[in-house]
Image (cartoon, rainbow, N blue to C red):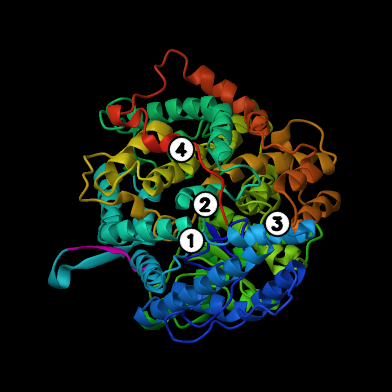
Amino acid sequence: MIHRHALLALAVAASLTLAGCNRTASPDAGTTPTGTTAPDGETADQFIARVNEELRALMPELTASQWLSATYINDDSQLLAAKYNERYLAQLNEWIEQARRFEGQQMTPETARAINLLKLGAAMPPPRNPEHLAELTRIASKMEGIYGAGQYCTGEGEARSCRQLGELEDVLRSSRDYDAQLDAWQGWHTIAQPMRADYTRFVELVNEGARDLGFADAGEAWRSGYDMPPAELAAETDRLWGQVKPLYEQLHCYTRARLDARYPGRGTVDGGLLPAHLMGNMWQQDWGNLWDILQPYPAAGSLDVTGALEKNYQTLLNERMVRENALIDSDRRADIAHAAKLENAKRMNQRAEDFYVSLGMPKLPESFWTKTQFIKPRDRDVVCHASAWDMNMAGDVRTKMCTKPNEEDFTTIYHELGHIYYDLAYNIQPPLFQGGAHDGFHEAIGDTVVLAMTPQYLQTIGLVGEQQQTQESLVNSQMRMALAKVSFLPFGLMIDRWRWGVFDGSITPDNYNAAWWSLKAQYQGVAPPSPRGEEFFDAGAKYHVPGNTPYTRYFLSHVLQFQFYKALCDAAGHTGPLYECSFYGNKAAGEKFWAMLQKGNSQPWQQTLKELTGVERMDAAPVLEYFAPLQAWLAQQNEGRTCGWTAPAAAQSPAASQPAAETPPRG
């Protein structure tokens, strides 16, 4: 899940930074970038006003090229995306250079903040060398295309068959055949191998760009966007992880026991690690698909949301088939099935929209329903990774998914609409302030709503049956949420721990894969089912690596969403245990939520957090408060078991896990 705001789909992932895009001529095209001439006597305030105006006016063309590249994958769309990325980054370099004129001058706090955000405006820091800039954008576009078109093929000739990510994920989601899951998992990871050399060069180029901006490397540039010294971010995330790690370890221990029972002799890898291909998810970041194995009390009321969604789709499909001749040809049947999938996906989105509207937020614009990619097209390759897009800072918002009728996609829709409503709320801000208070805020908005999707809420919308208020049903509902939320936490940390090491050189190209699995072992307690040598590039099988999206935001969001949730429950007047709260339909909570969203990135995130929650520090205590019943139950279940795991020796203290002391950015 990712947000494509005004920032580039490839170069400038939706962070707390520059919330706008611009189109300029390529610096090697022999022309001067449009809108970059600095008028004589221009003040800092006037400079920022000009940049904001140019961003707002020119963004639609740039985001359109990115949308086209993601929804029509071919050489032409990749070329357009690469050139627009190149032009934008060249323009960004121009703006940053112009901003140097105002160093040390008096200016309003708002202008000073905007200039700082401008300097932090690229997740893909642009080299000043025009040839290197062009090379960087070509590689970025190429890697995204490889990922989007990736498929695993077996057989020869007429027996040859190919499966893309969605089909391979279905195997991990639904099959419990050990070998079939292993084949699907290994198959998808083959798509990343061709990226390895490109990614190595990509790292060299973004580091060059980061140094041109005054940072030690791209990782330091990323860590500089949190209204705190960059060296403090690793310590802050370690502190938060330390709060929740005991809960994760209990969930890991329980899961390992259940897998051992389901796959005797094969449910655990040496050292007590969980086998990567058996976790129901390609990257082991969400264990919800293992509900059939991990459900604590099957007789305590059904929480089979996927079954209900599939039933809704089949009912819709059958109704459409009945209206047609029973003897229609197979092509027409395929058309009807596709139309039913589209209608069902729209209904799932309408259900999610209803939650936000119930809080007093506006209905989505009509253009959302006509321009969104709801399902995978039948005629072309697309990037299926779910994403939310703000195309023009003026209400043209849309999402891109390949929606299927299952619980994972259903909650993803609520998540993506959180991005969309954040966009709509802060569209009142100048473009440079149109972003999350920090990037973790953007990811937390929709997930705060997901926390309010209690079993009682799911019952009211007809997706689960009547829920008995028993200890068993409570444990079931807590487990359902923990398999999505708690399981994710260490994964949210380890991806950027790997990239920080790659960027600072402590993880070298000849050690990419070993370091990846060392960190997965250290943080997640997960291991591959068979050796993974350096002929593989398993990091590239996760979209955010070739897509160059910073990932620490997702870890932070999984802490923040519980803080937001608790604050909104308080605003709604909820009394009783936190986990029972749903603020669906509560206008007081909605008003407080919307007020925060409207602030965007116009002030330090600490101030925005305090206005909503009363505190200005991120804190995982609400996570532990929410899951207190489950943590106690897990401790009982795990009594007598040897919990924890032993990571391979190389994983004990990877260089990437603790970044060295950093120097402040210059220039």
Residue 63 or residue 300, whichever sits in front: 63
**Which mark sits nearer the N-terminus, 4 or 2?**
2
Q: Which residue is mark 4?
A: 659
**Residue under numbered circle 3:** 104
CA separation, marks 1 and 2?
8 Å
Label total for image? 4
Q: Residue at x 48, y 73 (%)?
A: 85
Residue range highlighted in magenta: 148-154
* Residue depicted at x 81% and y 45%: 611
Q: Residues within 10 Å of mark 4 (few under 14, many from 20)?
A: many
Which of these two is toward me, 385 or 635?
385
Secondary structure of the residue carrying numbered label 3: loop
Q: Is residue 417 visible?
A: no
- Image point 37% across, 35% down: which residue? 655
Residue 257 picture quarter: top left
Find numbered disc 2 in the image and state the secondary structure of the residue it sits on. Answer: helix
Label 1–label 2 contact, CB within 8 A:
yes
> To which residue does mark 2 refer?
221
Disc 1 marks which residue? Answer: 125
Alpha-carbon span between mark 3 and mark 1: 24 Å
| Marking on residue 117 | none
Residue at left 58%, top 27%?
243
Query: Whole-percent x and y of residue 32?
Result: 53, 84
User: In the displayed structure, would residue 386 be above or below residue 69?
Assistant: above
Q: Amino acid at mark 4?
A: Pro
Q: Distance of mark 4 from mark 1, alpha carbons?
A: 19 Å
> Looking at numbered disc 2 in the image, what kind of residue is underneath it?
Ala
**Which residue type carries mark 1?**
Pro
How far from the left and from the top, in percent, is residue 633?
A: 56, 22
> What amino acid is found at the position of numbered circle 3 in the picture?
Gly
